[in-house]
Amino acid sequence: MRALSSVPVIWRSLSETVASVSPDGSVVGISTGQGVVEARTATGLVARATVLVASSPFAFGVDVLSLAPGAQAPFAQ
């Protein structure tokens, strides 16, 4: 039996207007809705997962926040 890490996986979004997926499998929401992400191996194994992207009831008001390790900054309301 091979370890999973040795099997190459090709990731893709079947709903590119809702979510994108990077080559390492990281999923990023693009717009609200429901989408599907697929993982496929060269041996023919396929797995799909439903992704739900919802709007957030809040937003951060700071464009850029840079902190040193251990530093704290209050969030503006």
Image (cartoon, grey):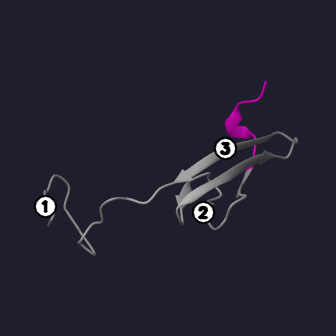
Rendered residue at 54%/66% (across/down): 30
Q: Earlier in the sequence, mark 1 or mark 2?
A: 2
Circles 2, 3 touching at the beta carbon (< 8 Å): no
Spatial CA span between label 2 and label 3? 13 Å
Q: Earlier in the sequence, mark 2 or mark 3?
A: 2
- Residue 8 drawn in magenta: yes
* Residue 11 picture location, percent across and down: 71, 53
Q: Which residues are magenta?
A: 1-9
Q: Compared with residue 29, is residue 51 higher up or lower down, i.e. above or below?
A: above
Q: Residue at the top extreme?
A: 1
- Residue at 55%, 51% (x, y): give it: 52
Figure quadrant of residue 5 = top right
The residue under the point 68% across, 52% down is 36
The circle on residue 73 is: 1
Horizontal side, residue 67 vs residue 7: left or right: left
| Image coordinates for residue 12, horizontal then vertical, percent | 71, 57
For badge 3, the amino acid type reads Ala
| Residue 58 is inside the magenta segment | no
Secondary structure beneath dot 3 equals strand
Q: What residue is pinned by disc 2?
A: 18
Instruction: Tell me the quadrant of the picture where the C terminus can be found.
Output: bottom left
How far apart are the alpha carbons under marks 1 and 3? 37 Å
Between 33 and 45, the one nearer to me in the picture: 33
For label 1, count other residues whose C-alpha is less than 10 Å away and answer few (under 14), some (14-19) or many (20+): few
Q: Helix, strand or loop at disc 2?
A: loop
Dot 2 surroundings within 10 Å: few (below 14), some, or many (20 or more)?
Answer: many
Q: Amino acid at mark 2?
A: Val
Q: Which mark is residue 49?
A: 3
> Could you tell me which secondary element the residue under label 1 belongs to?
loop
For the residues labelled 1 and 3, say whether their Cβ atoms are less than 8 Å apart. no
Q: Quadrant of the N terminus?
A: top right
- CA distance for labels 1 and 2: 32 Å
